[in-house]
Amino acid sequence: MKVLLPLSLLALLAPGVSANTLNEQLQQCSRIMPDSSRLICYDKLNAALEQSAEQNFGREQKQISQAPQSI
């Protein structure tokens, strides 16, 4: 449960990752039986979400600042 909360929060910050895809990836990780392999799966997913969040950070502000001054 401790791993799922940060992953879920990062998913909200990563618009490139859809909820279905993230849910499917989490389910795939949860099916891995050796604990160490399952943890590696979660770590890889977390790293991908963090990278996506970093790349998209501030993207909304950039779009707003490029809006026309008047309509």
Image (cartoon, rainbow, N blue to C red):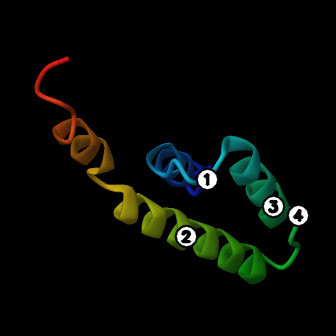
Q: Nearer the viewer, mark 2 or mark 4?
A: 2
Secondary structure beneath label 3: helix
Spatial distance from mark 2 to mark 1, Cα to Cα? 9 Å
CB-based contact (under 8 Å), mark 2 and mark 1: yes
Give the residue at mark 2: 48
User: Which is more toward the observer, 66 or 1?
Assistant: 66
Spatial distance from mark 2 to mark 4, Cα to Cα?
19 Å
Classify residue 4 as left or right of residue 21: left
In the displayed image of the protein, which residue is found farthest to the left? 69
Report the amino acid beneath label 1: Val
Task: Tell me, for residue 30, which label it has, or none.
Answer: 3
Choose the circle earlier in sequence order: 2 or 3.
3
Residue at 54 percent across and 49 percent down: it is: 11
* Quadrant housing the C terminus: top left
Mark toward the start of the polypeptide (1 vs 3) = 1
Q: Nearer the viewer, mark 4 or mark 1?
A: 1
Q: Is residue 62 left or right of residue 38?
A: left
Say which residue appears at 62% left-offset and 68% top-offset: 45
Residue 32's x, y, as percent?
A: 86, 71
Disc 1 target residue = 17
Residue 71's disc number: none
In the rendered image, residue 63, in percent from the top left (x then y), is placed at 28, 42
Amino acid type for the residue under numbered disc 4: Arg
Disc 4 to disc 1, how far (Cα)? Answer: 20 Å
